[in-house]
Image (cartoon, helix red, strand yellow):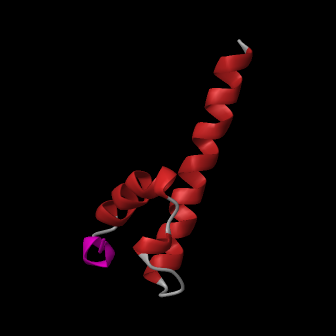
């Protein structure tokens, strides 16, 4: 039960951070290269969903 709660909590935080980083990339405050490796895939998905895949440069 505790593991499930922790998993749910951290999953939600990763999703929120991915949206925050995607927003910063779109506004030009950060680049995709500055995104932590642990959440790059989630940020990539958000940028693709927003049709901003041109901002993904590795």
Quarter where residue 53 is shown: bottom left
Q: Position of residue 34 (x, y in %)?
A: 49, 73
Q: Is residue 8 above or below residue 30?
A: above
In terms of depth relative to the viewer, which is nearer, 58 or 7? 58
Q: Given the current orientation, which residue lies at the most extreme top position? A: 1
Residue at the far right in the pictured view = 2
Q: Residue at x 29, y 74 (%)?
A: 57
Residue extending furthest toward the bottom: 28
Q: Quadrant of the N terminus?
A: top right
Q: Quadrant of the C terminus?
A: bottom left
Q: Residue at x 43, y 60 (%)?
A: 43
Disc tally is: 0
Residue drawn at (42%, 72%), measured in percent from left and top?
33
x then y, percent, for residue 48:
29, 63
Residue 53 on the magenta span: yes
Residue 40 placed where, x, y %? 43, 57
Q: Taking 58 as reference, is 27 left or right?
A: right
* Magenta residue span: 52-58
Compared to 43, does 22 lie above or below?
below
Left or right for 20, reference 39: right
- Magenta stretch contains residue 18: no
Residue 55 locus on image (x, y percent): 32, 77
Locate residue 29 relative to residue 53 in the image: left or right: right
Q: Which residue is painted at 57% across and 48% down in the image? A: 14
Give 52 or 32, whichever is nearer the viewer. Answer: 32
């Amino acid at each position: 039960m505790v593991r499930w709660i922790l998993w749910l909590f951290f999953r939600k935080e990763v999703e929120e951070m991915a949206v925050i980083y995607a927003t910063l990339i779109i506004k030009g405050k950060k680049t995709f290269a500055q995104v932590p490796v642990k959440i790059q895939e989630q940020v990539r998905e958000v940028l693709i969903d927003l049709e901003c895949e041109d901002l993904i440069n590795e």
